[in-house]
Structure formats: C-alpha cells, structure tokens
Image (cartoon, rainbow, N blue to C red):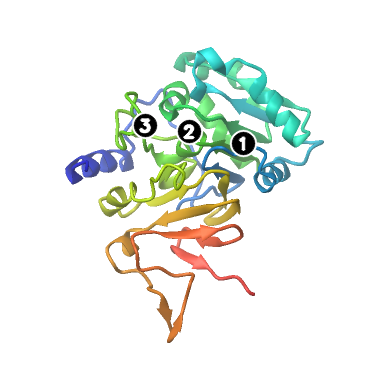
Amino acid sequence: MIKSILYITLLVTVLKGFSQTPIKVNTNSETQHGPEKGSLIIIGGNVGETPAIWNKFIELAGGKEKANIVVLTAAAGDSLALSPKHADEIKRITGVKKISILHTTNLSEANSEKFIKPLKQATGVYFIGGRQWKIADSYLNTLTHQAFFDVLNRGGVIAGSSAGASIQGSFLWRGDTAGSEILVGDHTQGLGFLKNSVIDQHLLKRNRQFDLIEAIKNAPKLIGVGLDEATAVVVQKDTLEVVGKSYVAIYDYNNIIGNGEGHVVNGKEDYTASSGPFFFLSEGQKYDLKHRTVIKTKK
C-alpha cells in the first residue's frame, strides 16, 4: 500500500493549485464540484454503443442536426491519434455529421489561437481513452484548457471515457508514465472540470473498487468517483446522475471514517445511505455533490 504521507503530500499540493502554468485558467464557477454551466459526461471505459450514454451526449451537445463535436485524441499518442477512425466511429453511432479531430502533443501549439479555433464553435468535446497523463502533457494550463471551460460556459458538454474520464477530475489518478498500476504518480493534476475530485474507471471489471479509499481518507475535501465500464455520470452543477449498464461508486470522507448516515433512518432501512467506505449508485440514481447525499427519487 502506498504510504499515507505520499498521499497527503501530493494531494495537498494539488489542492493548492500546483502546476507550471503558461496561463491561468478561469473556471468561472461557484459550485462545489460540478460546472456552473454546461454538463460533464464521465464514462468508465468500454462505452461501445451504449445508447443511454451516447443519446445523452448528443442531446446535451444540441441534437444530431446542431451538434458540433470536437474529438480530443491526445491520450492515444501520436501513432493512433490522427486516425479518422475515432471521429468515424462516433459519427456512425450518433448520426452527427459535424465531428472533427483535434490533436497535439505540443504545449506551445495548444497555447495558440490558431489551434483552439475549432473549439470556439464546439457544442461538445469528447476525450478518447488511452493514457491520461498524455492529455495533461498536451493541454494543461494552456489556451486549449481554457477553451474547454469556455465550451461549458456556453452551455456545451464535455465527455470522456477511461483516460478521458480520469482527466476530468482535479487530482489525476493513475497518472504515472510508468504504468496505470501506480495510483499516485508523476502526473497528479487533471483538467479539473469536476473540481475537488479524483476519478477512477474500469472499476469492477478490473477489481479497483478499494483503490480510492486511502486517497479520500487523507484528502477529505476530495470526492471520489469510481465508474465501471459502459457506465457514466452526467454532472450538471452539483448534481450527478448515473446512466449506463453497471455501477458507480462514491467515496466520501465521512463514510470512510464511519460518520456516514448508516442504513437506518427514522427506524426504517434506507438503501440510499451507507456507512461503508464507499457505496454504489445504479442507472437513474442521483447524488448531491455539494451536500454529499443521495437524492431520493419518488417511486
């Protein structure tokens, strides 16, 4: 197990805004975790043709006729990134006509007005999977990074699967260049669309459900979100909703240390509460990120 002192040092560093900043990115948000405007779709990997996820993405991007999607391929590396297959596959699944690929591994290029031109008209952004540290190396604290937030501020949607999910958090999980088995690595700053958060993916498929516990225990301000494959959360302001085939795990400090609500509320068993180190949400369930409570739905 990674020593707690390592978690504390790295997590506190990130919370204080550690970075080498070409520019200061303005998030324009007063929410606790989610975006003030626009939407996030954070997908646990292996999305395939999961209709609930793609339909929501296209809906939030303005519909098939109006959507203008920019696909970010940095996570795949140069050898695969420029292949048209990524845009072609999304076009085939969604029926959206206006889809383009944007790729660089050069921070100077990402920090140029010329490069961000496609993003100025985008209604949706999609990060493909691969290695999340490559996305950080390409875009962190550049004009492109700011342009992503501008898409949200116009009411657009940012989505991503696997590496494209983890990069949306503020603390970058599994961001080491040596391999994804290193939980806290040499890259620890995400793009921060979901503030004060750490995101894991392929959760149940790869038996990762216990990996985030120690991190949250040592950084109470962070919320942990672990997503299984073909499953996503849609985040608008501080409300999270699950869509897809499997489960999403929520990691909250109070639950981990035993101060959670527990299973009995007013003398009745409550299946929307947990006193364990994490709890699962399934499709259709909602969670209040600000107040850290499950939003009960009427039956």
Q: Nearer the viewer, mark 3 or mark 2?
A: 3
Which residue is identified by label 1?
151
Decide if residue 254 is on the left or right side of residue 265: left
- Give the residue at mark 2: 163
> Which element carries disc 2, helix, strand or loop?
helix
Report the mark closest to the observer, 1 or 3: 3
Q: Position of residue 228 (x, y in %)?
A: 50, 47
Please give the residue where the numbered disc 3 appears in the rendered image. 180
**Marks 1 and 3, how far apart in space?**
29 Å
Query: Please, what is the three-letter code of the amino acid marked with disc 3?
Result: Ser
The x, y position of residue 81, in whole percent, is 56, 18
Mark closer to the chain start, 3 or 2: 2
Relative depth, front residue between 261 and 49: 49
284 versus 14 height, above or below: below
Which residue is pictured at 43% across the width and 62% down the height?
292
Q: Residue 267 occupies which quadrant of the picture?
A: bottom left
| In front: label 2 or label 1 | 2
Q: Dot 3: what SS?
A: loop
Label 3: few (<14), some or many (≥20) within 10 Å? Answer: some
Query: Which comes sooner in the sequence, label 1 or label 3?
Result: 1
